[in-house]
Image (spheres, helix red, strand yellow):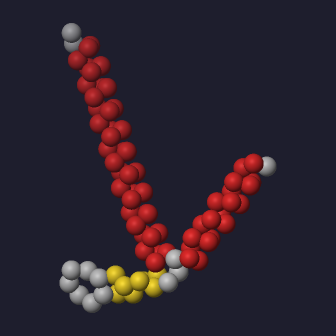
Amino acid sequence: MLQLLIAVAVTITIVLFGLANSHDVELSYIVGEPIRIRMIFLLFCVFFAGWITAYFYQMIAQVNRRRRRIRAEHDRDFE
């Protein structure tokens, strides 16, 4: 029951956040014409880009830890 209440509260918060940020903003690059985009879409894109970056960083860190562990086991076997 507590999980359901938390899920409902989070859903309501997300919906209210989306409604509060549904206005258009102007996004300009270094070159070219600025474009108009909804704020919530821009926030979602930035969140998704950060999530992807963190995911790949974790994958690289995991591969590096695995390599170090294998190298340490390999060195221990030849001592």
The C terminus lies in which quarter of the figure?
top left
Quarter location, residue 28: bottom left
Q: Outermost residue toward the bottom?
A: 33
Q: In terms of depth relative to the viewer, which is nearer, 67 or 56?
A: 56
Q: Residue 9: horizontal and vertical position, in percent?
A: 68, 60
Q: Residue 1: horizontal and vertical position, in percent?
A: 79, 49
Quarter location, residue 66: top left
Q: In terms of depth relative to the viewer, which is nearer, 12 or 59?
A: 12
Q: Residue 77: horizontal and vertical position, in percent?
A: 26, 13
Instruction: Tell me the residue at 41%/83% (across/down).
Output: 25
Q: Outermost residue toward the right?
A: 1
Judge left or right: residue 63 versus residue 40: left
Residue 37, above or below 5: below
Instruction: Tell me the residue at 21%/80% (across/down).
Output: 30
Instruction: Tell me the residue at 30%/19% (across/down).
Output: 73
Judge left or right: residue 17 versus residue 1: left
